[in-house]
């Protein structure tokens, strides 16, 4: 029986890349039914709330969403819908693979996965000003919150991910040498979880700054990396840079029940509607989604087609220096599906 998923085409280039991706995954043999739902500007345009209840109910029911980019108005207007969805479903693990897709990058054959804790750390936004001597903003303070519960579930997720995906090592990156309580707790919990996987998945811990340098010098020494929210935010973009930038980076947001898969890039209003957007990031997110719903064969077929076109072929969208339209690139990928 086909698996039902929620599809949120999104704003800007979202609908264009989503349609391309659905066509490719269909051709790759994915057995899915789609419940199309609105969010963001697309919902507002229909006089709806930017995050309609129907959309949330659909994700709750299907447990899996494939989401195009959503425009967040800056300064004024509604808050990020992406963040709201992650919060609503307590999607605590942000999974960011970084795999070489094209030749001529800084490195070839990089294949790493960073798992970022998505709900705690400094990004909980517990911060305030402190007034002194007539200056109401003489100082500012942010609180980093790490809980045993939060550290446990994300490090366990990292080990489970490694096990299920045939990966051999988890590196926990931290700053426990300086932040002995918060980062210390994260490290302590990670070491305890690592013991449960001894003999199955290797474990190491590394100071975050050294990890950043080592990733740039020799990324091949790493496999799966796990860290708290802000460190993961920064290093996941660094890792995307190792394999050609954010343009082709996918992300999975995993909660205890629901999961959402998306491209890392935004809605690209500058090229929206022109038929030139690159659907690769959302396609890679869809491949992660297919693995998640137990359809690894079409997922692998898609990755092989991407390798065939991007590593060995010549069809490229404009952002990659080519001249192909979304349509031409989509056709090339479909033709390359084995
Ligand atoms: P952006 O990622 O949309 O665009 C940055 C540059 O990359 C633009 O020149 C764009 O044309 C290009 N680009 C992005 N994706 C592309 C693709 N698939 N193919 C070809 N070129 C591509 O970032 P920007 O302009 O900062 O944000 C635009 C909107 O997207 C904002 O409202 C922002 O809040 C939202 N956004 C949404 C995200 C999400 O839904 N996960 C993530 C990041 C931004």
Image: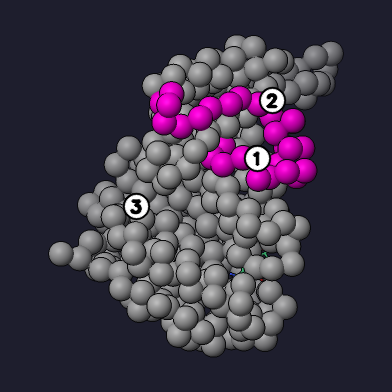
Q: Secondary structure at mark 3?
A: helix
Name the residue at the front extreme.
Answer: 199
Q: Which label was assigned to residue 221?
A: 1
Residue visible at 49% across and 38% down in the picture: 168
User: Quick one: label 3, few (<14), some, or many (20+) residues within 10 Å?
Assistant: some
Residue 32 at x, y = what percent?
A: 26, 67
User: Quick one: label 1, few (<14), some, or many (20+) residues within 10 Å?
Assistant: few
- In primary-sequence order, the first of circles 1 and 3 is 1
The residue carrying mark 2 is 207
Q: Find the distance from the CA under tag 2 to the CA under tag 1.
A: 15 Å
- In which quadrant of the rendered image does the C terminus lie? bottom left
- In primary-sequence order, the first of circles 2 and 1 is 2
Residue 27 forms part of the magenta stretch? no
User: Does residue 109 appear anywhere in the picture?
Assistant: yes
Q: Secondary structure at mark 2?
A: strand
Residue visible at 25% across and 54% down in the picture: 62
Q: Find the distance from the CA under tag 3 to the CA under tag 2.
A: 31 Å
Q: Find the distance from the CA under tag 1 to the CA under tag 3.
A: 26 Å
Is residue 206 placed above or below 180 in the rendered structure? below
Mark 2–mark 1 CB contact (< 8 Å): no
Give 138 or 157, whichever is nearer the viewer: 157
Q: Quadrant of ligand 1?
A: bottom right
Is residue 174 placed above or below 211 in the rendered structure? above
The residue carrying mark 3 is 292
> Which image quadrant for residue 246?
bottom right
Residue 209 at x, y = what percent?
A: 74, 30
Magenta segment boundaries in residue numbering: 197-226
Is residue 61 placed above or below 29 in the rendered structure? above
């Amino acid at each position: 029986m086909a698996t039902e998923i929620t599809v949120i085409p999104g704003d800007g280039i979202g609908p264009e890349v989503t349609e391309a991706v659905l066509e490719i995954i269909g051709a790759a043999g994915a057995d899915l039914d789609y419940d199309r739902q609105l969010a963001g500007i697309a919902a507002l345009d229909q006089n709806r709330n930017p995050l309609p209840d129907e959309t949330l109910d659909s994700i709750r029911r299907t447990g899996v969403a494939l989401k195009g980019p959503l425009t967040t108005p800056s300064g004024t207007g509604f808050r990020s819908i992406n963040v709201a969805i992650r919060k609503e479903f307590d999607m605590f693990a942000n999974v960011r693979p970084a795999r070489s897709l094209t030749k001529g990058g800084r490195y070839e054959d990089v294949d790493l996965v960073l798992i970022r804790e998505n709900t705690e750390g400094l990004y909980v936004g517990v911060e305030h000003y402190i007034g002194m001597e007539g200056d109401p903003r003489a100082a500012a303070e942010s609180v980093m919150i790490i809980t045993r519960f939060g550290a446990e579930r994300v490090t366990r997720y990292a080990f489970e991910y490694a096990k299920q995906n045939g990966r051999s090592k988890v590196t926990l990156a931290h700053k426990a040498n300086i932040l002995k309580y918060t980062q210390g707790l994260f490290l302590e919990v990670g070491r305890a979880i690592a013991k449960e996987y001894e003999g199955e998945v290797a474990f190491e811990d590394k100071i975050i700054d050294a990890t950043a340098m080592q990733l740039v010098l020799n990324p091949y020494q790493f496999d799966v990396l796990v860290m708290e929210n802000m460190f993961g935010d920064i290093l996941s973009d660094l890792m995307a840079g190792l394999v050609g930038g954010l343009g082709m980076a996918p992300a999975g947001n995993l909660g205890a029940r629901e999961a959402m898969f998306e491209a890392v890039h935004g809605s690209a209003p500058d090229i929206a509607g022109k038929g030139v957007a690159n659907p690769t990031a959302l396609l890679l997110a869809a491949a992660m989604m297919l693995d998640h719903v137990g359809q690894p064969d079409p997922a692998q077929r898609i990755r092989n087609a991407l390798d065939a076109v991007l590593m060995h072929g010549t069809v490229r969208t404009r952002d990659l220096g080519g001249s192909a339209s979304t349509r031409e690139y989509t056709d090339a990928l479909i033709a390359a599906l084995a």
